[in-house]
Amino acid sequence: MEPLQYMKNIPGEQVLDLAGLVEAGPGQVVSRTLAQNPAVSVTLFAFDKGEEISTHASGGDAMVTVLEGVGKFTVNGTEHLARQGQVLVMPAGKPHAVYAQEAFKMLLVVVFPPAP
């Protein structure tokens, strides 16, 4: 099998359990970058219960898909609970934070604006 050209840290030509590719231990937030370039970023995250990513903003539109558990996402001051199979888009430039209501896993896809 040839190595993947644009994706990394994930094998190609296999059916995989995406949530099984990342695990958080006690008190941890663990990430696994699958793609990173000027147009897009794709990252898997696993959060232990009570862990968080503090308020920040992104230069691109960020879409999270919850793979397991429940996450609380605060976007521009409004809280959203997302569960397994649910998705939330956080628009570029809007402050947002992530908190693990319980241990959870998510796939984050950020789409950046075209370079000028």
Image (cartoon, rainbow, N blue to C red):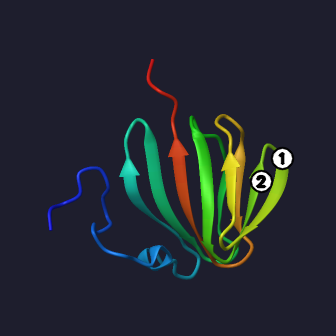
Residue at 23% x, 51% y: name it: 5
- Gap between marks 1 and 2 measured at Cα: 6 Å
The foreground one among 80 and 84 is: 84
Q: Could you say whether the residue bearing mark 2 is in a helix, strand or loop?
A: strand
In the picture, which quadrant includes the C terminus? Answer: top left
Q: With 17 as the anchor, is 103 left or right in this view?
A: right
Q: Which quadrant of the structure image shows residue 86? A: bottom right
**Identity of the amino acid at label 1?**
Gly
Q: With 3 as the anchor, is 17 left or right in this view?
A: right
Q: With 100 as the anchor, is 38 left or right in this view?
A: left
Residue denoted by label 2 = 74
Q: Look at the picture and state if 108 lies above or below 26.
A: above
Which residue ends up furthest to the right in the rendered image? 78
Residue at 79% x, 43% y: name it: 76
Q: Look at the picture and state if 47 lies above or below 36.
A: below
**Identity of the amino acid at label 2?**
Thr
Residue denoted by label 1 = 77
State if disc 2 and disc 1 touch (CB < 8 Å). yes
